[in-house]
Image (cartoon, rainbow, N blue to C red):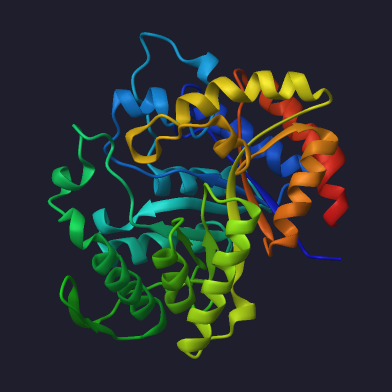
């Protein structure tokens, strides 16, 4: 049987974001047998994105007087390390060009110790908060260089984790004989899960990453991208079979398909209309995420597994925390046991 793992995104952003709700989602996910919990990352976030890029919660939970609360990812992961015992704790994904890689390497190594070696370090290029509110301008990062910056930063972090006296020379970051401890518990470091839907991201994974975790791709597109990852790994002398193929998926599960679709579609429509991924046809989104009855979800998960996916980061759509609990219970009862 294919070894498949499942994680849940907790509400560190979105209309239900709060400390209590983050902890509730994380501890319930662990108790139900999920393998991991994930947070989202941005520092600059806008009211427009709060209403249209809903990575946890649901469109129905939005209220007119909400502020765009977005709890910082690495700080939140440290808090979650103290209230959980078993689950892996990931971020999908750090906006890497806006992070000082020396500091980020130190933070992630510390988190690895605080969690007992349970950190998954998702990394990506990031995107603007909106056309008007540009995270890269706030940090003084040239948007058109973010790919090259990310590559160097990942290499620099690995140097810090792996070398007693760490040195790295690049265009965007350089240091020599930096004595930075503790080194991570996980060796050679926390797994780097590379985000992004493009061939560039897949090739970056093969060259530098331990996993690829794209979002809006269909099973057919995932299978093709996984082959790009494998080819890139082979070209760079790495073992392609050691790289995890993961996905990040919006999802709703219910006993009744119509109930699930009624829950999913308003939020999918809202999330499909951000400037960064304008989707003309709802069918495009439905082909790339996981919605429906228990049987629908079983079939959809199977399609992604057949495409090579071995980890699912689930972004459940839920207007209340009780609804999140109900859906996680259905996943735990009906889907997880199929892959245990």
Q: Position of residue 22 (x, y in %)?
A: 54, 33
Residue in view at x 77 percent, y 40 percent: 297
Residue 34 appears left or right of 200:
right
Q: Position of residue 244 (x, y in %)?
A: 61, 68
Q: Is residue 46 above or below residue 146?
A: above
Q: Is residue 95 above or below residue 202?
A: above
* Quadrant of res 157: bottom left
Residue 162 appears left or right of 147:
right
Q: Is residue 301 visible?
A: yes
Residue in view at x 38 percent, y 76 percent: 158
Q: Position of residue 100 (x, y in %)?
A: 24, 60
Q: Is residue 268 above or below residue 298?
A: above
Identity of the residue furthest to the top in this view: 64
Residue in view at x 86 percent, y 66 percent: 1
Q: Nearer the viewer, residue 333 or 227?
A: 227
Residue in view at x 55 percent, y 39 percent: 284
User: The C terminus appears in which quarter of the rendering?
Assistant: bottom right
């Amino acid at each position: 049987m294919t070894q498949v793992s499942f994680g849940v995104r907790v509400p560190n952003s979105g209309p239900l974001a709060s400390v209590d709700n983050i902890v509730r989602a994380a501890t319930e996910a662990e108790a139900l047998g999920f393998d991991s919990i994930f947070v989202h990352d941005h520092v600059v976030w806008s009211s427009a994105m709060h209403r249209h890029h809903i990575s946890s919660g649901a469109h129905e939970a939005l209220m007119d007087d909400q502020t765009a609360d977005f709890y910082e990812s690495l700080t939140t992961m440290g808090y979650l390390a103290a209230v959980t015992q078993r689950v892996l704790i990931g971020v999908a994904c750090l906006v890497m060009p806006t992070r000082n890689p020396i500091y980020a390497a130190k933070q992630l190594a510390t988190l690895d110790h605080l969690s007992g070696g349970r950190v998954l370090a998702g990394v990506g290029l990031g995107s603007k908060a909106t056309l008007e509110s540009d995270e890269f301008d706030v940090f003084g990062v040239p948007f058109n260089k973010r790919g090259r910056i990310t590559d160097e930063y990942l290499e620099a972090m690995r140097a810090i984790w792996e070398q007693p006296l760490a040195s790295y020379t690049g265009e965007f970051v350089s240091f020599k004989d930096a004595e930075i401890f503790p080194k991570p518990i996980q060796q050679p470091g926390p797994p780097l899960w590379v985000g992004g839907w493009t061939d560039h991201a897949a090739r970056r994974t093969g060259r530098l990453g331990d996993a690829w975790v794209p979002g809006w791709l269909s099973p057919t597109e995932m299978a093709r991208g996984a082959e790009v990852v494998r080819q890139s790994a082979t070209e760079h002398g790495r073992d392609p079979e050691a790289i995890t193929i993961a996905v990040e998926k919006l999802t709703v599960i219910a006993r009744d398909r119509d109930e699930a679709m009624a829950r999913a579609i308003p939020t999918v429509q809202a999330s499909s209309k951000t400037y960064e991924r304008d989707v003309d046809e709802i069918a495009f989104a439905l082909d790339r995420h996981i919605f429906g009855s228990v049987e629908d979800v079983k079939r959809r998960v199977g399609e992604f597994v057949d495409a090579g996916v071995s980890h699912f980061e689930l972004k459940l759509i839920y207007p209340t925390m009780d609804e999140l609990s109900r859906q996680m219970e259905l996943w735990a009862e009906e889907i997880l046991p199929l892959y245990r």
